Amino acid sequence: MKPLDVLQQSLHKRVLVELRGGHSFRGVLDGFDQHLNLVLSGAEEVVNDQVTPKAGVTLLRGDSIVYISP
Amino acid sequence: MKPLDVLQQSLHKRVLVELRGGHSFRGVLDGFDQHLNLVLSGAEEVVNDQVTPKAGVTLLRGDSIVYISP
Amino acid sequence: MKPLDVLQQSLHKRVLVELRGGHSFRGVLDGFDQHLNLVLSGAEEVVNDQVTPKAGVTLLRGDSIVYISP
Amino acid sequence: MKPLDVLQQSLHKRVLVELRGGHSFRGVLDGFDQHLNLVLSGAEEVVNDQVTPKAGVTLLRGDSIVYISP
Amino acid sequence: MKPLDVLQQSLHKRVLVELRGGHSFRGVLDGFDQHLNLVLSGAEEVVNDQVTPKAGVTLLRGDSIVYISP
Amino acid sequence: MKPLDVLQQSLHKRVLVELRGGHSFRGVLDGFDQHLNLVLSGAEEVVNDQVTPKAGVTLLRGDSIVYISP
Amino acid sequence: MKPLDVLQQSLHKRVLVELRGGHSFRGVLDGFDQHLNLVLSGAEEVVNDQVTPKAGVTLLRGDSIVYISP
């Protein structure tokens, strides 16, 4: 299974995205491109166990991503 | 929804942009390119809860961006 | 043996992946691409000897990888 | 408005350029290229509120830039 | 002598590979590509004088490499 | 004035080059390429106000450069 | 003089190579490529005034290089 296939299969499902520098995001994957830029809806940012909900859709830059899991 | 479509839909709306190193910007998205370089008008820079308004339009370099949300 | 051949031979086997910043992952390699983006199933994240199991498949961004071993 | 249009409109006007690592520069924008490398004349470097004037023209490498504002 | 020729000559010989962030690896060079991704067999990881043997072949990402010596 | 024109005009003149990580160099610009790699002759390295003269010509890697001024 | 010409002229001569993170190397330049990857023979690594001789030829990755001087 190719990495982009994983994203294709995760569309419209909840994912956890870990970013460099200790941020992470949880939300529903609404889109992506070949640079691993991601679109999340209903996202929550998690920094040091502190959860901040984000209105609308959040765009995460692929360059900042360490891993993506369900 | 592709990442660049999110930016297209956010044109002329307020966005929050988180940059590497703890800066963030709030402002109205007036433009962007495929590198995720962004143009904000009426922008405010936020560093450690300290808000600094920026006159005119601010150009944010895509390389420095972690995420963009409404 | 070329680096991508190592990944090809490791398909469906357990690997250890060390990431920048002190994270590492153990899991079964289910896929990869030429950027060294990896797909792991049954993955566990290891940070400072603390092990966190990850449900489903985990996508690791190649940019963050330092080394991969069995 | 595209990011490079902002630079085109800022030609021969004063700009503030924030660089990675806490440096910033103020000066008149005399030129730029598509990598966001910038040419400033009459520039002042600002590090921790300490202002150092720079003679002649200063070339700022685009890679180091976080944002540009008027 | 071109850099890649050095790797070609080092094939099946022991090398020391220094990575960013204070890791290093010793092992027999079994392969490489033009990105300087390396394949080591019988590798040992060395961090702060602590040596950890690695079973099988280890793939080191070229991006993380500082230098390679015999 | 394009950024590379600034370098062309600075040929055979003294420049100050600030690098990432607090190094800087002063010297006569003897050459450059499109990556902003620079050749300085009669260069002095300055680290924390300590000046070290360099014999012959010094090649500075463009990737490490923050700014160049006269 | 173009940056790569400096390397061409330094072939078979002793150079000092400063790397990111406080390492440096001294040795005879035996080769290079357009990425500034370098081949040194008879190299010594210098970290905090501690000198470690390296047997055979050492390959330095261009990405890690800050400057090269005679």
Image (tube, coloured by chain):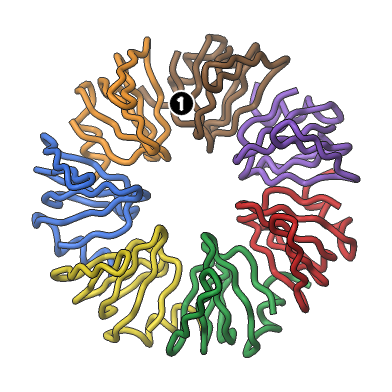
Chain colours: A brown, B purple, C orange, D red, E blue, F green, G yellow
Q: Is residue F47 left or right of residue C11?
A: right
Q: Is residue E18 above or below residue G4?
A: above
- Residue located at (69% from left, 46% from top): B61
**Front residue of B6 and E24:** E24
**Viewed as shown, does residue E54 lie left or right of G13?**
left
- Amino acid type at mark 1: Leu
The image quadrant of residue E44 is top left
Whether residue C1 can be seen here: no
Is F65 rendered above or below residue G41? Answer: above
Give percent across and percent down for residue F55.
Answer: 43, 89
Residue drawn at the location 55% of the way across and 15% of the way down: A26
Q: Is residue F54 left or right of residue D48?
A: left
Number of dots carrying numbers = 1
* Residue that label 1 marks: A4
Q: Quadrant of residue A1?
A: top left
Q: Report the quarter where the C terminus of chain C lies.
A: top left
Give percent across and percent down for residue C18: 30, 34
Instruction: Tell me, yes or no, if residue D33 can be seen here.
Output: yes
G32 versus E20 height, above or below: below
User: Residue F36: percent from the left, percent from the top?
Assistant: 57, 70
Left of A20 or right of it: where is G41? left
- Name the subunit of mark 1: A
Crowd class of label 1 (few under 14; some 14 to 19; many from 20; radius 10 Å): many
User: Is residue A9 placed above or below B64 in the rendered structure?
Assistant: above
Residue at coordinates 44% horizontally, 72% vertically from top-left?
G67
Q: Which residue corresponds to the image point at 73% horizontal and 64% vertical from the top-left?
A: D45
Viewer-side residue, E58 vs B19: B19
Residue G2: x percent and y percent? Answer: 51, 82
Secondary element at tag 1: helix
